[in-house]
Amino acid sequence: MTVAIEQLAPKVVKVDKSQPLYPDYLPFYDPLEKVEPVGPFEHDEPGHRADPAFPNLLKNATTAFELSPHCGTELQGVQVSELSTAGLDELALLTAQRGCVVFRDQKYIDIGFDEQKRIASHFGPLHKHGWMPHPQQGPVEFVIVYDSKDDLRIRRSWARKSPIQFHVDQSPESQPPGLTFFCMLESPPGAGGDTIISNMARAFERLSPSFRKRLEGLKAVHTTANPILREIRDNGDNAVLRRPITKSIHPVVTLHPVTGQKALFVNSSYTQSIVGWDDEESDYMLKFLFDHINRGHDFSCRVRYEPGTVVVWDQRITQHSQTLDYAAGDRRHAFRLTPLANVPIPSKVEEDDGECRKDEARVMLNLC
Ligand SMILES: [Fe+2]
């Protein structure tokens, strides 16, 4: 009996690359939609409960390696969706210590909206974004990042300027995010689309002692005004404006609630000014700090994605930037879940003679 050569060949399942692999996670834009912010809440920090030996998190780990000396650990053999409560607590601690933790081939991307939300909510109530899309049939807490030839909103918003912009997601919230889950569904076919994650504790340590002292005790204004104006400029009547402008005052140098590390907490996406300083003084200082962060190749790591990669980072100790360096039109499809955490803790409370309080009141009343 003869066997046709085709019968011996392994069966190849053909994937139609012209269509998104995760249609349920496509972005949905409704210019009329509104959402209520989470509001004040008592944050219960999971990292405080963690065993520092990580017995639950590392139980099935086959490999663990550092992405760079100061930021990033990749764990292989661990499924985030199979971690126990104690394992998730340990993930919070490891992420606080290393800035970000990378997992590959994650079942997490296929467990559905409810389970994905349940696991991310372990770290805090989930943020509801003011302008980024969510899935049409999916919860509003999902942020969809979708760049493709059939949706060029991201490309349009970064046209004619550098896509490198280090930031903390949603720092203008009164209780900004702690851990963040970024989950890659489809990545561009070749290299590209990485995230650069940078350690803000190390960024602070790199400054001279007397300069660090000057920064401690300062506060800065964080606002969503500029991104919202950009959304209106880029999308006109189709702009998504679910929430009014959010504004908060946060310390320039914060303490991490678990590790106690001091970190720079100003970012070029949302930090507008230093409270009490004249515009020229504030602009000059913020430009220096943003340049210092941009130059920090020695305290950052670069995370390369493949489908199924889940990256967890701690927004209280890191900033991150997209790269947007792959070919325009290639599909990059991810979702993000962003648990909120503590009110930022100042590294030092400056002696107040009453003047600072007046400055803060003026900022919140939009008088300066
Ligand atoms: Fe971001």
Image: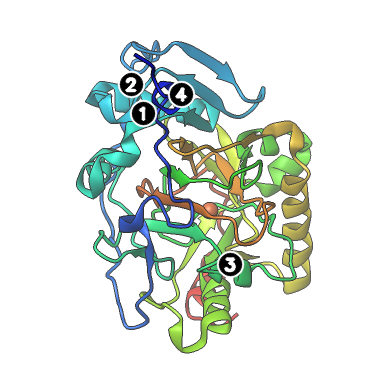
Q: Nearer the viewer, mark 4 or mark 2?
A: 4
Residue at image coords 72%, 65%: 282
Q: Could you say where residue 22 lies in the image, as x and y percent from the top left? A: 36, 52
Q: Earlier in the sequence, mark 4 or mark 1?
A: 4
Task: Return the residue nearer the eye: 195 or 216.
Answer: 195
According to the picture, the residue beneath numbered tag 4 turns out to be 5
According to the picture, the residue beneath numbered tag 3 turns out to be 355
Residue 36 in view, yes or no: yes
Task: Report if the CB atoms under discs 2 and 1 are less than 8 Å apart.
Answer: yes
State which quarter of the image contains the C terminus: bottom right
Q: Could you say where residue 105 lies in the image, as x and y percent from the top left? A: 42, 29
Q: Amino acid at mark 4?
A: Ile
Q: Amino acid at mark 3?
A: Glu
Task: Report if the CB atoms under discs 4 and 2 are less than 8 Å apart.
Answer: no
According to the picture, the residue beneath numbered tag 1 turns out to be 47
State which quarter of the image contains the N terminus: top left
Q: Earlier in the sequence, mark 3 or mark 1?
A: 1
Q: Nearer the viewer, mark 3 or mark 1?
A: 1
Q: Nearer the viewer, mark 3 or mark 4?
A: 4
According to the picture, the residue beneath numbered tag 2 turns out to be 50
Q: Earlier in the sequence, mark 3 or mark 4?
A: 4
